[in-house]
Amino acid sequence: MCVSMLSVVFAMTQGSVNLSPYAVWQALLGQGSGLNQTLVLELRLPRVMAAFATGGLLAVAGALMQILLRNPLADPYVLGISGGASVAALAAILLGISGVLMSGMAFLGAVLSTLLVFGLSARLGNTATMRLLLTGVVIAAGWGALITLMLALAPPHKIPGMLYWLMGDLSYASTPWLAWLVLVPTCLILMPLGRSLNVLARGPLQAAALGVNVKSLERFVFLLASLLTAIAVTTAGSVGFVGLVIPHMLRMVLGNDQRLILPASALAGGCLVTLSDTLARTVIAPEQLPVGVITALLGVPTFLYLLQRGRL
C-alpha cells in the first residue's frame, strides 16, 4: 500500500514541469498557482488514476485466468481476450462511439473471444489447459489480422490515433472513473471468494469434493476477467505483460494464497503501469512514448528471466 501511494505521488510530481510533493498537495487542495492546479488537477491526476486502475485491472485479470486454467502462462493477451476487446473498441472508434458504449462493445468483444476459446477447446479432455492456451494464441492471431484489416480500411485521419491507441496510450485518459468503479468492487467481491479460488486452483475435482460449485465459479471468473480486460483496453488501449508478469512475481514473494495474491496484484499492477507511464512521458519529454512500449520492454526480459529460472 505504501509503495502504491509513493508511486502515485512520484508520478504526480514528474513531467515536463517537475513539482514538489508539497506543490502537488497544495494544488489538490485548490491552492497554489493556477499553472500548478491545471497541471495537477486537469492533466496529471486523471492520467495517473487511469494508469493505476488499468494496471490493477490487467493484473487481477491475469491472476484470475491463471487460476481458471491452472497454468502460469494464462493471460488475457495470450488467450486472445484483449484481442477481441481491441477489435470491438476499434470498431467503436471507427463508428464515432466513445465512453460507456465503447466499454460495452469492448466487453462484448472480450466475452465473444472467451467463448470462442473455451468453446473450441470444450472437448479436449486432460489436455484442455494446454489446448486452451494454443487455441487462445490462434484466436489472438486472428484478431490481429482483423485489426490490420480495419486499419487498412480506416479513414486516413483516424489511423494515427488508432495506431497509437493499439500501442497503449494514456494521453486522452481524462475519465478514469469507470475503471475505478470496476476495480474497487471487483477487489471487494473477490476477497470472500479467496478460499474457493484457492481450492479451484488445485483442480476442479478437488474443488467439487470440497463443496465448491465449480461450473458457476469458472463462469464467473472468466466473465469477470473479460470485463476487467475490456475496461482496461478501453481506458488505455493495448498494454501487455502486466497480467502475465505481476502474478508470478507476487507468488515468488507471497506464495499461492489468492486472498493475498489478488489484492496485491491490483496494487502491484497499478504501480507498474503508473511508473511505466511516468517513464513514457518523461524519458524524451516533451515527446511521449506509448505506455505499452514501456511495459513490453520491462515485461519481456522479466518473463524470459522467470522462464530461464524455471519459474514458469
Image (cartoon, helix red, strand yellow):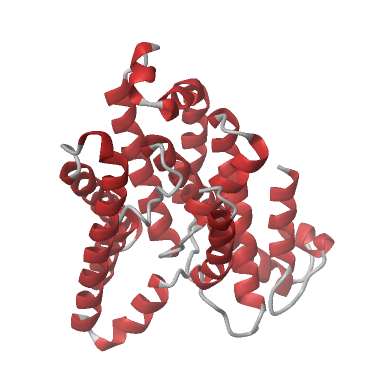
Q: Outermost residue, bottom direction? A: 156
* Location of residue 166 (image quadrant): bottom left
User: At 43% across and 45% down in the image, what residue appears?
Assistant: 61
Question: As displayed, is residue 306 above or below residue 95?
Answer: above
**Side of 35 relative to 169 (left or right):** right
* Location of residue 255 (image quadrant): top right
Q: Position of residue 268 (x, y in %)?
A: 62, 48
**Side of 141 relative to 67 (left or right):** left
* Location of residue 271 (image quadrant): bottom right
Q: Position of residue 183 (x, y in %)?
A: 49, 42
Q: Is residue 8 visible?
A: yes
Question: As displayed, is residue 283 above or below residue 130?
Answer: below
Question: As displayed, is residue 202 above or below residue 117?
Answer: above
Question: Which quadrant of the figure contains the N terminus?
Answer: top right
In front here: 3 or 66? Answer: 66
Q: Position of residue 274 (x, y in %)?
A: 61, 60
User: At 44% across and 30% down in the image, what residue appears?
Assistant: 201
Q: Position of residue 285 (x, y in %)?
A: 65, 83
